[in-house]
Amino acid sequence: MRSLTVLSIVAAAVGLAATSARAESPFYVSGSVGGYFRESDSGSDQFFHRDAPTVVVDGTDRRGFDPGVVGAVAVGYRLIPHVRIEGELGFSTETGSTLNPDTTAPGFAALNGQTFKHASGDRFTRFTGEANVFYDFSPFAGRFTPYVGAGVGGSANHQTAGEFIASGGTVFHSGSGSSTEGFAMVEGGVSIPLTCNLSIVPAYRYVHYFADKEDVAHVVKVGLRYAF
């Protein structure tokens, strides 16, 4: 009888230790979705007639974008009570909304800075990988843990060909292509626990891509974080 009592106590202690170890695990996983708001950009560009593609002229172009969507998954590790590091994979997509091409070259009278509106195509997609570090502040109201962070990474980009139309009916075709870019981001948000392991995390992120043209995006997202 005494042996059974001792075994029961040992088993309970082991179970309690295992539960405590799980609660204190520094690892977590997360996933998020949100809106992707890319700022308008402008810069130098080149234009040509579709029936004479070898005749290329220099000019400038301003481009606007419609809101898009963004999603990401991440694996994180808590280094110390207030500091976390993450590896993240993400995806975003948006379409162009307007183009304002401009050139003084003869034979391109329609490219005078007027606005061409999106008709079809011109979709941008990005696949990203990054490393982030976050600082968690002390919780307030017993539940809410605000945080700030920053990260750097790289993106693989693709643009499909598109068609834009001016008010007078003139058609402008944008090109397609692929590229890679580096980027940096800063983020702020708040973690709100739903259970002892699961939290909902609304956040805002500012992203700056290192491109020939200024390439900036704002991300408003909500995520779920599961701590092991």
Image (cartoon, rainbow, N blue to C red):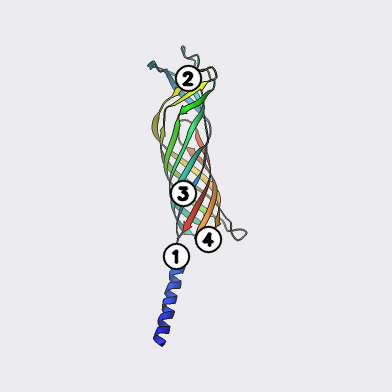
**Tag 1, which secondary structure?**
helix
Marks 1 and 2, how far apart in space?
Answer: 61 Å
Residue lying at 40% horizontally and 81% vertically, measured from the top left: 7
Marks 1 and 3, how far apart in space?
Answer: 24 Å
Q: How many marks?
A: 4
Looking at the image, is mark 1 or mark 2 earlier in the sequence? 1
Contact check, label 3 and label 2, Cβ < 8 Å: no
Task: Give amino acid for label 2.
Answer: Val
According to the image, label 1 marks what residue? Answer: 22
Name the mark nearer the viewer: 1 or 3. Answer: 1
- Quarter residue 174 falls in: top left
The quarter of the image holding the C terminus is bottom left
Q: Position of residue 26 (x, y in %)?
A: 45, 60
Relative horizontal placement of residue 3, taking residue 112 as reference (left or right): left
According to the image, label 3 marks what residue? Answer: 132
Name the mark nearer the viewer: 3 or 2. Answer: 2
